[in-house]
Amino acid sequence: MSIITVDRLRRTYTLTEGHWRRRRRTIEALNGISFEVPAGELFGLVGPNGAGKTTTVRILSTLLHPSGGSARVLGLDVATQAQELRRRIGILFGGERGLYGRVSGRHNLRYFANLYGMSRPHATRRIAELLERVGLASRADDRVDTYSRGMKQRLHIARALLHEPEVVFLDEPTIGLDPLGAREIRDLVRQLRASGQTILLTTHYMPEADELCDRLAVIAAGGLLAVASPQELRAQVPDMYVVEVTLREHRSDVVAELRRLCGPDGSLSIEERDGHHVASIQSMRWRDLVESIPATLGWDAIGPLMVREPSLEDVYLRLISGASAPLQAVSG
């Protein structure tokens, strides 16, 4: 069952520019994207700043109306059934806004529990449970303006989970955090995923997307470039796999033979690492090279050999740069 269904979703903005001669300009933030998210999946929206990620989240969380197409979350239309849907979803936009700094973390959550109409006994139990879960139990009664940015982000997550939502939207949950704070947030997201929570996460940090997400939608300039798992995306760029082989000696005849094996469709580079020369060959025929290099040169000429797969960032940069034909969109 699809928990989130996006069908040819569009969103345009009209801007008025000029001081003396006013003119109107239309910006297309989303130009007809479609994807589905099944129950229990951690689905990522990745793309550069201004790609349309936050616009998509704002539409799906009922904070913004689409200009065209449709979107349903938990079977409810985001435009016509917004009130019913809001009770069943949690949203994290993070940052300093949305929290009250002059009161404690516990009182912040109590305030939002009242807005959700939670009974006092239920809210008390739920607040204590969440403060423990996000690692803020020992600071629960301190003023929020004494919290670090990472602690505030964890409190945002507690607020998003307070009413036990069926779907959680996390928009750039680690942006602006130091490495330790970002790791703590990623650990929390992993815990949510392990509990079976359906999550839609946006990020432009590719290692984070690779580490957390089951599938990704790559967005650029409001358009959808690919929908696939990180593994499927990497598999679609076989020419980006790299064979790395350590040379026992930097001999011209060995380099010439490597260049011949590399062929016209590959690229060869040699660099010095820790006092050793390492040859790196990028080729679609990397599997053949793993066998042909030792067979041709012999182990007396070469040392360790390894294959490095393309990183998700490699694939992402190729997609958004348009350096090659668009990758096949994979779904399911």
Image: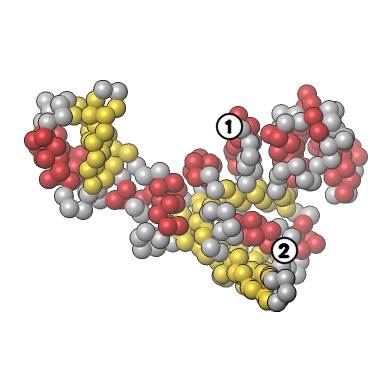
Residue placed under numbered mark 1 in the picture: 179
Q: Amino acid at mark 1?
A: Pro
Horizontal side of 23 relative to 48 (left or right) equals right
Residue 20, quarter of picture: bottom right
Q: Please say if 70 is above or below 229.
A: below
Picture quarter with the N terminus: bottom right
> Tag 1's secondary structure?
helix
Q: Residue at x 44, y 61 (%)?
A: 329
Type of amino acid at the residue the image marks with label 2: Leu
Disc 2 target residue = 64
Residue under the point 22% across and 43% down:
268
Residue 162: image quadrant is: top right
> Which of 331 and 248 lies nearest the eye of the viewer?
248
| Position of residue 278 measured from the top left corner of the image (x, y, whole percent) | 24, 32
User: Does the image show residue 1?
Assistant: no
Above or below — where is 149 with respect to 80?
above
Residue 188 in view (yes/no): yes
Relative side of 318 to 60, left or right: left
Q: Tell which residue pokes out farthest to the front in this image.
A: 20
Residue at 32 percent of width and 48 percent of height: 240
Horizontal and vertical percent position of residue 166: 70, 50
